[in-house]
Image (tube, grey):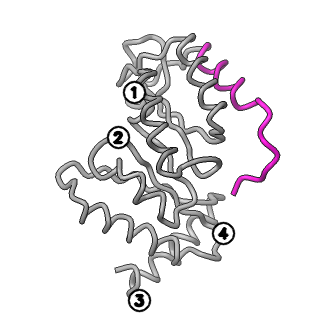
């Protein structure tokens, strides 16, 4: 386990490797599909806490992906962990504004807000045949969603490439929308 000699050595190696490549954190993208029990969720939260404890003082932050399925939708549980960043995946990727907004509201109701919460969206590419996934965003829907994120105080974004296996070109309107969102004025507070 993380508390063992081997676990401590692994955390030291992780911190050293992160610093060596200029990374300021690690993000766990754990997506178990067979076991969605609360026991499994709690064990994962314990792993995240032990990892955060083991990396404390190293300058390496710990983050995790959350979603709307399996153990990843236990927002209350994961909000209480020592992770510095929780970023959504499929819960907000797909350009389904009603579903995306409901999931954002659930995250915020669990206490996930401000600089600790990152919202993931899937990119749109051309030609469409290059997309491994079609996230269904349109320019007006993306603009509306980014406005909702801004109004909700979201300060971080995670973009998943739809063309991860067969590279295309990201739609210019998608890049333009993200750029405008990234260049907007932020509240006067420091990000962790």
* Secondary-structure class at tag 1: helix
- Distance between the Cα atoms at labels 4 and 2? 30 Å
Q: Residue furthest left?
A: 34
Looking at marks 4 and 1 on the same chain, the residue that comes earlier in the sequence is marked by 4
- Distance between the Cα atoms at labels 2 and 1? 10 Å
Residue at image mark 4: 59
Report the residue at 77% width, 38% height from top.
186
* Secondary-structure class at tag 4: loop
Q: Which mark is residue 5?
A: 3
Vertically, is 79 above or below 159? below
Residue at image mark 2: 68
Looking at marks 2 and 3 on the same chain, the residue that comes earlier in the sequence is marked by 3
Q: Which mark is residue 99?
A: 1
Looking at marks 2 and 1 on the same chain, the residue that comes earlier in the sequence is marked by 2
Residue 70, image x, y percentages: 26, 48
Looking at marks 4 and 3 on the same chain, the residue that comes earlier in the sequence is marked by 3
Vertically, is 82 above or below 131? below
Vertically, is 80 above or below 114? below
Q: Which mark is residue 109?
A: none
Residue 67, image x, y percentages: 38, 43
Contact flag, marks 4 and 3 (Cβ < 8 Å) = no
Magenta range: 173-192
């Amino acid at each position: 386990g993380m508390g063992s000699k081997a676990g401590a050595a692994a955390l030291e190696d992780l911190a050293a490797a992160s610093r060596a490549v200029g990374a300021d954190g690690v993000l766990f993208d754990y997506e178990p599909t067979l076991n969605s029990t609360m026991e499994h969720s709690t064990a994962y939260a314990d792993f995240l806490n032990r990892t955060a404890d083991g990396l404390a003082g190293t300058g390496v932050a710990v983050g995790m992906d959350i979603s709307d399925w399996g153990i990843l939708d236990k927002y209350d549980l994961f909000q209480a962990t020592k992770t510095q960043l929780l970023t959504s995946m499929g819960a907000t990727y797909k350009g389904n504004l009603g579903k995306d907004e409901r999931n954002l509201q659930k995250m915020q109701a669990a206490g996930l807000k401000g600089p600790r919460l990152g919202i993931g969206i899937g990119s749109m590419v051309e030609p469409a045949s290059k997309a491994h996934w079609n996230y269904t965003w349109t320019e007006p829907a993306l603009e509306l969603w980014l406005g909702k994120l801004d109004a909700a105080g979201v300060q971080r974004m995670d973009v998943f490439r739809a063309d991860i296996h067969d590279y295309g070109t990201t739609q210019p309107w998608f890049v333009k929308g993200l750029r405008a969102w990234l260049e907007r004025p932020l509240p006067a507070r420091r990000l962790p």
